[in-house]
Image: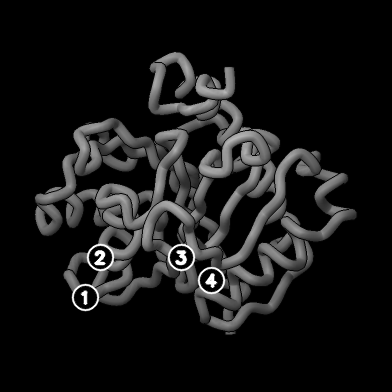
Amino acid sequence: MFGSLDASNFSGSIPFYDNEFEKILSKISICYQLMKTDKIVLENDENKIRDILLLNYLKNDEIREKVDLLEWHFEREVQEDHSIGRTDIKVISPNTFKKQEAYYILECKRLDNTNTTGNSGLNAKYIENGIDRFITKFYSSYYRVNGMIGFVVEDIEIDKNVKKINTLLTSSFSTIITKQEITKDSFIEDFDYHYTSIHTDRDNAELKIHHLMFDFCENCI
């Protein structure tokens, strides 16, 4: 019976778990809005921004209850058991207690307005140290769906910057097979900057990545 938990074994699992993950991402976006409302002051440091989101909000019991996050548990910078990756945020669901591999991953990356079309800018690092790590199985993808959070630390037009990431994805990262470029999505209410891309991993299996872009340019010092 528990074999049915293996999302790679049957195609019908993906929409179900994608819907669950979309619900989680919707709740995380509420935490982002709370950070903005609270006028949190942030250092321009990827790990420190992640830690405030994680420790002050996603692991805050009062907020977890307020935004209905009690079903899930969030862990920081965890070494994976079945790949060599060390995840930014590991999302544990009730299924994880039945099948240890059954969790989601969130990878966090800073984005700024420096060298946005070049291979040494943070847009390129978003692909190289983010998207590609899912494609190459540096990070595992048990449910065939995971997520990335872009921490926007300087004033940029986010939709235009996503187009620049897509251009880099096709021009400079040809080893990544992209079936759908990073495309605007609509499952989160009152939050414009969420997107989805679909890729093929090194085992020729389809992989979906959700992208949340959190604008912290006014919060960073």
In this picture, residue 10 sits left or right of residue 4: left
In this figure, which colouring scheme has been used for the structure?
A: one colour
Q: Are marks 3 and 1 in contact (CB under 8 Å)?
A: no
Q: CA distance from mark 2 to mark 1?
A: 6 Å
Q: Position of residue 33 (x, y in %)?
A: 69, 54
Q: CA distance from mark 2 to mark 3?
A: 20 Å
Sequence-earlier tag: 1 or 4: 1
Viewer-proximal residue among 129 and 215: 129
Secondary structure, mark 1, is: loop
From the image, tell me which residue sits under label 2. 124
Q: Residue at position x 47%, y 28% from top?
A: 6
Sequence-earlier tag: 3 or 1: 3
Q: CA distance from mark 1 to mark 4?
A: 21 Å
Q: Which mark is residue 217?
A: 4
From the image, tell me which residue sits under label 3. 86
Q: Residue at position x 54%, y 39% from top?
A: 102
In this picture, residue 143 sits left or right of residue 199: right
Which quadrant holds residue 57?
A: bottom right
Q: Say which amino acid is labelled 3.
A: Arg
Select label 3 or label 1 by which is in front: 3
Image quadrant in which the N terminus is located: top right
Q: Which mark is residue 120?
A: 1
Viewer-proximal residue among 64 and 41: 64
Q: Position of residue 55 (x, y in %)?
A: 73, 67
Say few, some or many: other residues with alpha carbon within 10 Å of mark 4 (under 14 / 14 to 19 / 20 or more). some
Viewer-proximal residue among 100 and 107: 100
Q: Say which amino acid is labelled 4.
A: Cys
In this picture, residue 6 sits left or right of residue 175: right
